Image (tube, helix red, strand yellow):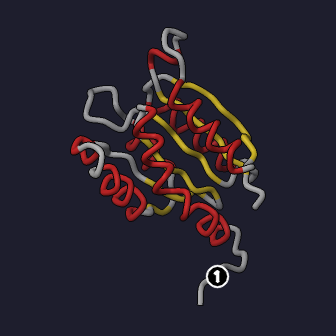
Amino acid sequence: MNMRIAVLTVSDEGAAGRREDTSGGALVDWIAARGYELAAREIVPDESDLIAGRLARWADSESIDLIVTTGGTGLGPRDVTPEATRSVVEREVPGVGEAIRNDGRVKTPYSVLSRGLCGVRGTTLIVNLPGSVGGVRDGIATLTPLIEHAVKLLRDEETDHA
């Protein structure tokens, strides 16, 4: 399936060039391994207006099927990715965040502390993942069997629904 995916890393340290973007890199590796197209990749600091602005611009371009964010989903005072995402999505998809947290509990009880969410803006699916490489790998393992079906639904294409 031809799918265009954007990766938004939310990290004060990464945006300042003081930390390598390993979680975003893990997403890029997953995109390449699946044969999808990396449509955009950016790092922004933990600032709601910057996060929301980037998500809205990418989704409104109508050329990106999926935006995956990494970082800013925890309990820290600067962790604002879910709030920024909620401000731009038109419909939430709560089961995705629930599944990611539930599946992550197999590896660490801390996964339930992630506040990441999933929602739709226009025809773009937006998913928040944690900022750690392990959290990204666990989250993407949960998402992988769902993504193509979700994108087909958003494109109003035929699916294997009976």
Position of 27 with respect to 94 (left or right) is: right
Q: Furthest residue to the bottom?
A: 162
Mark 1, residue position: 160
The answer to which of 41 and 85 lies nearer the viewer is: 41
Query: In the rendered view, would you say 95 is above or below 39?
Result: below
Q: Residue at x 64, y 68 (%)?
A: 154
- Amino acid carrying label 1: it is Asp
Label 1 crowd (10 A; few <14 / some 14-19 / many >=20): few
Can you give x and y, in whole percent of width and height, for residue 10 in the image? 48, 29
Looking at the rendering, which quadrant does residue 125 occupy? bottom right
Residue 67 image position (x, y, % from top left): 59, 46
Work out which quarter of the rendered image holds the C terminus and state it: bottom right
As rendered, which of 134 and 75 lies closer to the eye? 134
Drawn side of residue 12 relative to residue 43, left or right: left
Question: Which residue is painted at 56% across and 34% down in the image?
Answer: 26
**Above/below status of 102 relative to 156:** above
Q: Of helix, strand and loop, which one carries label 1?
A: loop
Q: Is residue 52 left or right of residue 95?
A: right
Residue under the image location 59 percent in, 30 percent down: 25
Please report the residue visible at 38 percent of the width from the left and 54 percent of the height from the top.
100
Q: How many marks?
A: 1
Q: Is residue 90 above or below residue 29?
A: below
Q: Residue 101's spot in the image, x, y percent?
A: 32, 52
Quadrant housing the N terminus:
bottom right
